Image (spheres, rainbow, N blue to C red):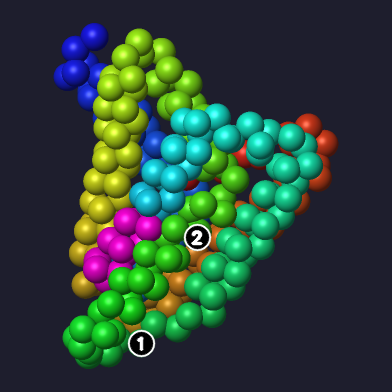
């Protein structure tokens, strides 16, 4: 199979993933509007880094550890609690415009802060773990190891590119919003995240909820 065809399939799958609406999507948009493109782009990089790790784990078959009912309950509760904490933090954050301080120390702290947030936020969502089993299964359809890697890399790069584009578009919207409006957006997104978190924490305890995990990336 031609490399171009494999890359095209990876891009199409990555585009499908990028248009799915989940907690990471709302967090990305909210961060871009309230904190700007630089912070949200580092959040996107953190999300991408966690995606790479999850693909690596699924690639080597370690994901089977998470397929038992007990493991799903633990993952759901922990993931839900993490997302609820992010939601509470976001909902209680009032936006106040201020002149940026561009010291190297501050910028490095900001980079690490949002890289860490993106990584933790995405990897705490059980739906993302189970979602990555799908492209891994599709990749296994290719006969060559190199073709499988190209397919998965195409998905990851497409997803990261689309997240960066979302950040850029949201950052442009920020120019037309007042501090009060951005604060309201924080409240709304925080509430949405809390709802996602509560659902994840309780989902595996509900009847017929073994597949948690339809709250995708």
- Foreground disc of the pair 2, 1: 2
Kindly report the secondary structure that dominates the magenta region of the rendered protein.
Answer: helix
Q: Is residue 36 magenta?
A: yes
Q: Is residue 90 above or below residue 5?
A: below
* Residue 91 belongs to magenta span: no
Image point 74% across, 35% down: which residue? Answer: 68
- SS for callout 2: helix
* In the foreground, 185 or 108: 108
Residue 118: x %, y % from top left: 42, 60
Tag 1 residue: 96
Q: Left or right: 43 with respect to 98? A: right
Please name the residue shown 58% across and 61% down the image: 83
Residue 113: quarter of image:
bottom left
Tag 2 and tag 1, C-beta contact below 8 Å: no
Q: Which residues are magenta?
A: 35-46
Which x, y percent locates residue 159? 32, 42
Q: Position of residue 37 (x, y in %)?
A: 24, 66
Residue 86 visible in the current orientation: yes
Is 164 situated above or below 68? below
* Residue 77 higher or lower than 216, as above or below: below
Tell me which numbered mark, 2 or 1, is placed earlier along the sequence: 1
Task: In the rendered structure, find residue 16 and report the number of the disc placed on it.
Answer: none
Q: Gap in Å between the C-alphas at discs 2 and 1?
A: 26 Å
The percent coordinates of residue 180 (x first, y second) are: 39, 81
Q: Quadrant of residue 29?
A: bottom left
Check disc 2 and report the residue beneath it: 120
Q: Check disc 1 and report its element: helix, strand or loop.
A: loop
> Can residue 21 be spotted in the picture?
no
Looking at the rendered image, the quarter that the N terminus falls into is top left
């Amino acid at each position: 199979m031609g490399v171009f065809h494999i890359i095209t399939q990876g891009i199409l799958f990555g585009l499908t993933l990028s248009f799915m609406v989940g907690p990471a999507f709302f967090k990305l948009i909210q961060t871009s509007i309230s904190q700007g493109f630089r912070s949200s782009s580092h959040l996107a990089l953190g999300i991408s880094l966690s995606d790479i790790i999850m693909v690596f784990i699924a690639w080597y078959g370690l994901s089977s550890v998470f397929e038992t009912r007990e493991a799903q309950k633990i993952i759901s509760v922990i993931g839900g609690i993490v997302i609820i904490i992010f939601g509470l933090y976001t909902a209680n954050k009032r936006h106040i415009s201020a002149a940026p301080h561009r010291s190297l120390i501050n910028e490095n702290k900001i980079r690490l802060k949002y890289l860490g947030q993106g990584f933790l936020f995405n990897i705490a969502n059980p739906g993302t773990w189970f979602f990555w089993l799908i492209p891994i299964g599709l990749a296994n359809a290719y006969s060559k190891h190199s073709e499988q890697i190209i397919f998965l890399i195409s998905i990851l790069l497409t997803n990261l590119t689309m997240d960066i584009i979302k950040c850029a578009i949201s950052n442009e919207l920020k120019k037309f919003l007042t501090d009060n409006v951005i604060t309201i957006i924080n409240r709304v997104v925080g509430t949405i995240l809390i709802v996602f978190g509560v659902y994840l924490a309780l989902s595996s305890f509900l009847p017929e909820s073994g597949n948690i995990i339809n709250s995708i990336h």
